[in-house]
Amino acid sequence: MKKISRIEKLFTNQQKACIAYLTAGDGGIQHTLDAAMALIDGGANLLEIGIPFSDPVADGPVIQRASQRAISAGTTLKDVLWLVKEIRQVSDIPLVLFSYLNPILAGSQSDFFSEAKNAGVDGLLLVDCPIEESTFIRDACMTNQMDLIYVIAPSTPMSRIQYINEHGKGFLYYACRKGTTGVRDGLPDGFQEKLASIKAILNLPIVVGFGISNNEMAKEVCKIADGVVVGSLFVKALEDGLPLVSLSKLAQHIFAMNLNSD
Amino acid sequence: MMNTIGRYDEFGGTYVAEILMQPINELRAAWNEAKSDEAFTKALFDILKNYAGRPTALTEVPYFSAKIKGPRIYLKREDLLHTGAHKLNNALGQCLLAKRMGKTRVIAETGAGQHGVATAAACARLGLTCIVYMGSKDMKRQAPNVSRMQLMGATVIPVENGSATLKDAVNQALRDWSESYSDTHYCLGSALGPHPFPEMVAEFQSVIGRECREQCQQQFGAMPNIVIACVGGGSNAIGIFSEFLSDHHIQLIGVEAGGTGKELGQHAARFYTATPGVLHGCYTYVLQNSEGQIAETASISAGLDYPAVGPQHAQLYKNKRVEYVAVADDEALAALQLLARTEGIICALESAHALAYLVKIANQLPKNFSVVVNLSGRGDKDLPQIMARENV
């Protein structure tokens, strides 16, 4: 019988997915490990680990700067897998690598996919690889029992969402606004209606990200969605030198829906 | 990699964030419709002839040739096109398409500033709002072009990230487009990026090659033996090469920026290592390190200073139809000076790379050979930089 994956397990629970994003190697890989543990302590039940890339065209200034710092610190794909292994030692939450395609292509010259699996990676999300171009990655993920996570966007037509839903694995990531990643004050106009109409045609779980930066937004999102992604806010907090104890508290505050709602 | 649409063998494809897939699908549909619509092709022909000044001349340069003991040398004079480079062929085509799609705002990236100036002109002429992203390093070294864009009503936005050159300007333009696609067209300046840009830009630039073939026939009653063009993204090169690709006896040579040395970071010669990767929407040869991080590039020529090459050039390299070489900064500068003194033509530093390679091989070529060099642009924009170097 097929073993239930960590991602599947998370979404079959009644809890919402509280997803925290970190750029690996920002402040050094050890610092990312410490920050990851702080976020898990603060209630993150899935981590998205960003592989830094020199030209992150889908990211706003906060994650651009973090990527630059991580690259300057010499972060490699090997370091990222070390980070995953270290987290795995102490935590069983799903871990998803979040990357642009080129570093993965460079890594796929060697045994990246099997090494990622062995390190404890559960899924891979490629920002600049739409479903049409993803066959070879999807096959490699499948072979190694990892989920290739697809993004849907406000511009994605319903028919295409349906298609992505049929071919996706694990969950779908709804990048809920135009433009790039970054901290925002509120949800876009018509968000609830749009999300509800998307949710109605899916069988995969859906999580929402892009600009989610406080508990009100997170709760609003999770009225309909299966989870929420918070990225730039945490990355910015680390950039500003927020102590890890406070980072934990920040996560606790934003992710407070699982404690309150049931 | 796979065989999806927009491929040149394994190269090309559409590697963009999901948010841009629908805008790109709409662009592809509009382009496919426009290119077979007589009204569109006629409007483009008219504006190229009566506004841009096509056809451009094919000029024989005997005094330049005598100095380098060369064969018969002809220059395809894209430097004479309105705004001073071949870029206007594409900018007018895309801006006409943007209008047809109902877009009111056009964004562009620019390196040397020639594509920015061309887009600014096309937008002024066609009544579109124009925003140009330009690396702050390039704004400094191509200052005259910044003023020209501004004079024509464009907003030039400096890009400080990364190496503050063309690559970073493309990043910023893509970020803008992922937010603004509803009313905005991204007028990409070279034959690269996600499908349909490489195909569309090549098509708009193919007018260079078509004219050139006809002019060769008129002026010396034969086809050239060799055609040489500089290759940044590769739009002027594909524009002139495309007409001759199926004439296998015609030698085609693309010249990249050799910069100051062979180490990664000292040049923009993608074919030195020919490492495939994905940057800015397509799978092609990309200068990068072993971790897949895109490398910094260096060249005296802002227009060639870019880490990826158009996917069709990647194919033409792999199947050996085109030979790709590189020349150093100093060689390009020397060729520019020689042409200026012998023929009274000041070409762009980009185009000077193509000339410089011809200078290197000229005395080995049979005297009865005819060689066409695509003189992709004029050099006024480069004056501050040229005058700043010694030995002028």
Image: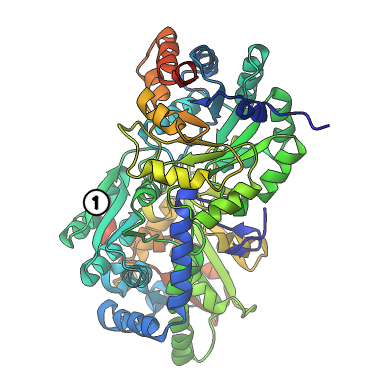
Task: Spot the residue most to the left.
Answer: B151
Q: Say what secondary structure mark 1 lies in.
A: strand
Residue A107, quarter of picture: top right
Query: Looking at the image, what colour scheme do you see?
Result: rainbow
Between residues A195 and B262, which one lies in front from this camera angle? A195
The residue positioned 31% from the left and 74% from the top of the image is: B81
Measured as percent of width and height from the top left, residue B54 is found at 33, 81
Residue type, label 1: Val
Question: Which residue is labeled 1 in the image?
Answer: B156
Mark 1 crowdedness (10 Å alpha carbons): few <14, some 14-19, many ≥20: many
Could you tell me if residue B206 is visible in this image? no
Residue A68 vs residue B118: left or right? right
Could you tell me if residue B303 is visible in this image? yes
The residue positioned 32% from the left and 33% from the top of the image is: A184
The residue positioned 41% from the left and 28% from the top of the image is: A218
The residue positioned 61% from the left and 40% from the top of the image is: A204
Q: Is residue A149 above or below residue B184?
A: above
Between residues B376 and A148, which one lies in front from this camera angle? A148
Q: Is residue B286 above or below residue B222?
A: above
Measured as percent of width and height from the top left, residue B282 is found at 54, 54
Measured as percent of width and height from the top left, residue A181 is found at 40, 36
Q: Is residue B60 above or below residue B90?
A: below
Between residues B370 and A47, which one lies in front from this camera angle? A47
Q: On what subunit does the disc labeled 1 rest?
A: B
Residue B360 vs residue B159: left or right? right
